Image (cartoon, rainbow, N blue to C red):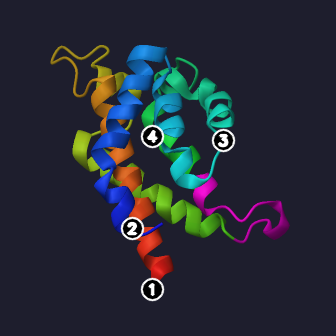
Amino acid sequence: MPATDILARKEELAAKAVALRAERKFNCAQAVACALADEVGADFETCYRLSEGFGGGMGTHTETCGAISGAVIALSQLNSGGTEVSGTTKTATYQLVRKVVEGFQEMNGTTICRELKGVGNPEGMRRSCPGCIEDAVNLAVEVIAARAQQDEN
């Protein structure tokens, strides 16, 4: 897939993820991972199941934002070489993940669910769940496109 293809569909993929949460009651991790499933060669149902526990900031502990976790699942699927080459792709996958996490942190000031939601903060919410989902999908798409372009060259 040419890198420009996924970039052209970035808004569509973000909207799909937001709709999965709103219409089908997916958690934020499920919404992101499932919206990106086809893009990374993953099975939709498997993404749904594997990401279920990451909602609410990891099982409602309000820690790392579930939308970020969903992006990590997708990027891991995209980049991992699997058990046949165990350990050989880990560093490269971590680099892809770091781009999403750092980008999200830069955009929102935090990656922690409770801080994003404004829990215990008199100033209120920093970013809504749909907004976090959009950010995570957009960042992941940019990473996927950059990797595709690298593969093309």
Question: How packed is label 4: few (under 14 Cα within 10 Å), some, or many (20 or more)?
Answer: many
Residue at 80%, 65% in the rendered image: 86
Q: Secondary structure at mark 1?
A: loop
How far is mark 2 from mark 1, CA to CA?
11 Å
Q: Mark 4 highlights which residue?
A: 68
Q: Can you give x and y, in whole percent of width and height, for residue 70 in the image?
A: 51, 38
Q: Mark 1 highlights which residue?
A: 153
- Mark in the foreground, 4 or 1: 1
- Mark in the foreground, 3 or 4: 3
* Dot placed on the residue nearer the N-terminal end, 3 or 2: 2
How far is mark 3 from mark 4, CA to CA?
19 Å
Does the stretch in magenta take in 38?
Answer: no
Quadrant in the picture for residue 80: bottom right
* Dot placed on the residue nearer the N-terminal end, 4 or 1: 4
Q: Mark 3 highlights which residue?
A: 43
Q: Secondary structure at mark 3?
A: loop
Residue type at mark 3: give it: Asp
* Residue sitting farthest toward the right: 84
Whether the residues at callouts 4 and 1 have beta carbons within 8 Å, the answer is no
Question: How packed is label 3: few (under 14 Cα within 10 Å), some, or many (20 or more)?
Answer: some
